């Protein structure tokens, strides 16, 4: 390679890296750094999210899986039914457009992409407003938990019991009253639950990008 060509290639490489670093510093998605099967977390702003923030003591209340649709990045998310949302639309729902992208170390894109896309339709179910491990309904972190367990054989995050959550906050109490008490249901303190933050803190998760 001639010196001139070398410097041209080197300059192009440095420019690309600089553009990616600049995008990261401004909190924009950097698709070049993602692979299908990466996991994205956001800070949802719904009433339910306020209760989840109290219960889990974390700002990170929603999670989905990065997938490709028509060669564009989308997020597979359980919002009843399973939906694929353009990544920018997904991030725009987050407080201050905050997001984090992680990679699960047990997931191998080279061998597990087909199983990933085959597993997702199995969980096209109504949204689970009761946060139960149920065959009939599903919630966001339950989707990521089951899909990656199906594919890798490993559990992403720590399954806890409902009684381990902080349940005495005003938003949590209001949600329990509306969804359970007022409909004749009771909270089961032994109910298993998997939360977005427990998945984010899994030791096998590698941070790929953070908006802040």
Image (tube, grey):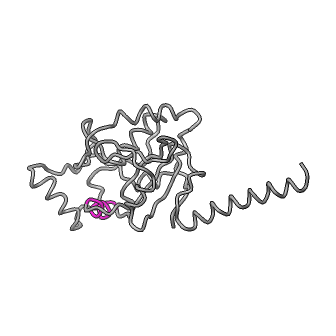
Where is 148 relative to 19, above or below? above
**126 and 185: which one is in front?**
126
Q: Residue at point 61% right, 66% down?
A: 22
Where is 172 relative to 78, above or below? below
Quarter of the image for residue 136 reads top left
Residue 174, position as x, y percentages in the image: 17, 63
Residue 50 inside the magenta-drawn segment: yes
**116 and 160: which one is in front?**
116
Residue 148 inside the magenta-drawn segment: no
In the shown orientation, is residue 103 left or right of residue 85? right
Q: Residue at point 28% right, 38% down?
A: 125
**95 and 181: which one is in front?**
95
Q: Is the magenta stretch mostly helix, strand or loop?
A: helix
Q: Residue at point 39% right, 60% down?
A: 60
Where is 190 relative to 178, above or below? above
Residue 91, position as x, y percentages in the image: 43, 58
Range shown magenta: 48-56
Q: How many marks?
A: 0
In the shown orientation, is residue 139 left or right of residue 155? left
Residue 26, position as x, y percentages in the image: 55, 68
Residue 137, position as x, y percentages in the image: 26, 40
């Amino acid at each position: 390679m001639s010196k001139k060509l070398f410097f041209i290639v080197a300059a192009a490489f440095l420019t690309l890296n600089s553009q990616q670093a600049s995008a990261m510093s401004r909190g924009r998605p950097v698709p070049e750094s993602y692979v299908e099967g990466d996991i994205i977390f956001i800070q949802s702003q719904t009433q339910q999210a306020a209760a989840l923030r109290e219960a889990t003591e974390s700002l990170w209340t929603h999670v989905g899986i990065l997938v490709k649709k028509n060669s564009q990045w989308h997020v597979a998310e359980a919002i009843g039914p399973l939906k694929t949302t353009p990544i920018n639309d997904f991030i725009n729902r987050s407080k201050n457009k905050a997001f984090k992208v992680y990679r699960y170390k047990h997931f191998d894109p080279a061998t597990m992409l087909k199983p990933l896309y085959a597993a997702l339709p199995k969980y096209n179910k109504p949204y689970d407003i009761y946060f139960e491990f149920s065959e009939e309904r599903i919630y966001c972190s339950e989707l990521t938990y089951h899909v990656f367990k199906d594919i890798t054989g490993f559990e992403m995050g720590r399954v806890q019991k409902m009684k381990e959550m902080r349940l005495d906050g005003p938003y949590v109490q209001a949600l329990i009253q509306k969804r359970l008490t007022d409909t004749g249901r009771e909270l089961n303190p032994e109910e298993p639950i998997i939360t977005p933050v427990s998945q984010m803190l899994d030791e096998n998760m590698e941070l790929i990008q953070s908006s802040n």
